[in-house]
Amino acid sequence: MSDPAFDADALIEASARLLRLDLSGADLAVVRTHLETAERLARVALDFPLEDEAEPAPVFVA
Amino acid sequence: MTTAAGTARAVASGEITARETTAATLARIEKHNPALGAFTAVTAERALAKAAAIDAARARGEPLGALAGAPFAVKNLFDVKGLATLAGSKINRARPPASADSTLIERLEAAGAILVGALNMGEYAYDFTGQNAHDGPSRNPHDLGHMTGGSSGGSGAAVAGGLVPIALGSDTNGSIRVPASLCGLFGLKPTYGRLSRARSFPFVASFDHLGPLARSVEDLALSYDAMQGRDVADSAQALRAIEPTHPSIEGGLKGLRIAKLGGYFARGAEPCAFEAVARVASALGANTTIELPESDRARAAAYLVTMAEGASLHLERLRARMADFDPDVRDRLIAGAMLPGAWIVKAQKFRGWFREQVAELFRHVDVLLAPATPTRAPKLGQVTFTLDGEEMPVRPNMGIFTQPISFVGLPVVAAPLWTHGESLPIGVQIIAPPWREDLCLRVARALEREGVAAAPLAAGFA
């Protein structure tokens, strides 16, 4: 479940203007579902303490 | 259809010519591709010319490569000289033909392999089903009413249907391992940064990998070895020497500490996924179960980074050509473009933390086992499935077990298992520390040798 306070429709409307995306050809109900999934997963992924110095890790060293 | 190694040995010994094997391959493609939906382009003229060159080299007494005369095909996101690089899309059909082959094609051909065509895939690789709105679905050779898995769906169909012994795919979140699991193949996703991605169409630069699918571990090792090596054209490639794996695949299990992954990897799937892992663990004598902490967060972080990077890649195309996207891909990309940047940066930082946990785990174990997919192949067109009592969409959730692993770039071989009375297989991930593809292949070969894992030709195409 996404957070009831999360207003996907408002995000869609504001972002589409910012990104200059004409969404008349999109299925907005599906876009909303994807955003709600992302919001739920963001709470899973981000509710975790990391040091300010934490680095991303795109390259591996044996 | 024999293995690539078998073909190369037969060509080297003069038992068959490269021309004969190429002609037979082209005839099989023509006969079976309409049912499988595997190929989107067949490079017959080029293949026959390459075959003639190999036969001429043999006639002159020149040494032949390890894959001499063996046919292969590539997911259509690889550049093939003379073809537009579709990446499964309608939009890319307007691209000019590629002026050069991708590096990995060049390297396989340098080893004597013969490119016979380009393969169907989910649009822009944002897919786990193998379905494509423009080219139709690739179909599972073991049951044509079922999915191949994706996004390297044509690669799975082509190899399981015996059209080619080796196909190249890409794997961002599982797109080699999912079709390997659903089509009953061995698939190798190497360490992130190992194989050059030069002249292939990207999806999520942070996670994109290229690798082979095959019906034998030897073919995986031979093709992987041929593709290794530094390529300055891929700026994300790591500085690693070539580390051949083929000489060690018969090395057995001696000295290897192997464990099953528990926790996240032991829930949220159909029983067949866990039974497959248990059978592999039993065969390998792996009695311990260990936990990779915070794997649910790793999967979630990978999901968010994928949404955002994929959307960034395609934003201009969304503005200009929205109507030409596959709707299933379009709406995910639109949503991805709207995610806050702060989420994505933190997800990337979590990746660093998770990598450290993985490194710690590998101090105590050499190889980890996990399911490759939560189910066997769903039916074509199936939109949802129920896992642990929760109904969820198929398309994003076939990768729940592959995503946390590629999130930190670990090398994996997906090995296929079969159950008596079931027509469809399911795969197990054999996971090793960074740069230890050799361990994945050794363990997979041990399972293959013992008959625990196998990749038979689909019955309808034998």
Image (cartoon, helix red, strand yellow):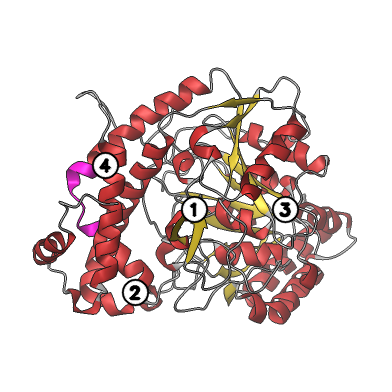
Q: Disc 1 or disc 4, which is closer to the eye?
A: 1
Q: Disc 2 or disc 3, which is closer to the eye?
A: 2
* Residues rendered magenta in the picture: B336-343
Labels 4 and 3 within one chain: no
Residue B38 at x, y percent in the picture: 60, 72
Q: Determine the residue positioned at 44% across, 77% down.
A: B133
User: Observer-nearest residue: B183 or A59?
Assistant: B183
Which secondary structure is most common in the magenta stretch? helix
Q: Residue at label 1?
A: B389
Left or right of B56 on screen, residue B223: left
Q: Residue at label 4?
A: A43
Disc 3 and disc 1: Cα gap in Å?
A: 47 Å
Q: Residue at label 3?
A: B67
Q: Earlier in the sequence, mark 3 or mark 1?
A: 3
* Residue situated furthest right in the rendering: B15
Disc marking residue A58: none
Residue B401 at x, y percent in the picture: 51, 45
Q: Residue at label 2?
A: B325
The kind of secondary structure element at disc 3 is: loop
User: Observer-nearest residue: B177 or A45?
Assistant: A45
Circles 2 and 3: CB atoms closer than 8 Å = no
